Image (spheres, rainbow, N blue to C red):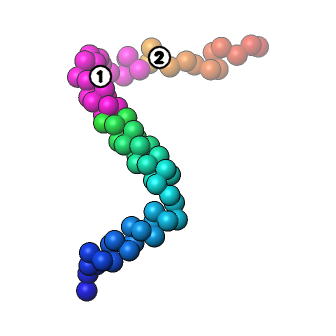
Amino acid sequence: MGLSTTHLIIFLVIIVVIFGTKKLRNIGADLGGAVKGFKDGMKDGAEKAAEAPTAPVQQVSSAAATAKETIDVEAKTKA
């Protein structure tokens, strides 16, 4: 049991009576603008991702390198 053509026409007439053609036109324009903005944003994001240089990754594997970065709190306290 699906929707027939007459059901759809009656449904559309009720929607037009409730909202009016001007409000439906505004809703359609707003929805179209939102979709266009989304597509443009996706295109710009893809272009920026392709242009962005990748930073070199540094790996610290020795304990001496981490020892240089640590601070001994007890040695810095005032007596």
Of 72 and 33, which appears nearest the observer?
33
Relative to 73, 53 lies left or right: left
- Quadrant containing the N terminus is bottom left
Q: At 51% from the left edge and 60% from the top edge, which residue is drawn? A: 19
Query: Separation of disc 1 and disc 2 at Cα?
Result: 34 Å
Name the disc covering residue 20, or none: none
Quadrant in the rendering for residue 68: top left
Circle 1 crowding by C-alpha within 10 Å: few under 14, some 14–19, many from 20: few
Q: Amino acid at mark 2?
A: Glu
Q: At 25% from the left edge and 18% from the top edge, which residue is drawn? A: 51
Quadrant in the rendering for residue 48: top left
Of 2 and 60, which appears nearest the observer?
2
Q: Is residue 15 above or below residue 54?
A: below
Relative to 58, 68 lies left or right: right
Q: Magenta stretch?
A: 40-66
- Quadrant containing the C terminus is top right
Q: Which residue is mark 1?
A: 48
Name the disc covering residue 69, or none: 2
Q: Looking at this view, name the residue that lies furthest to the bottom.
A: 1
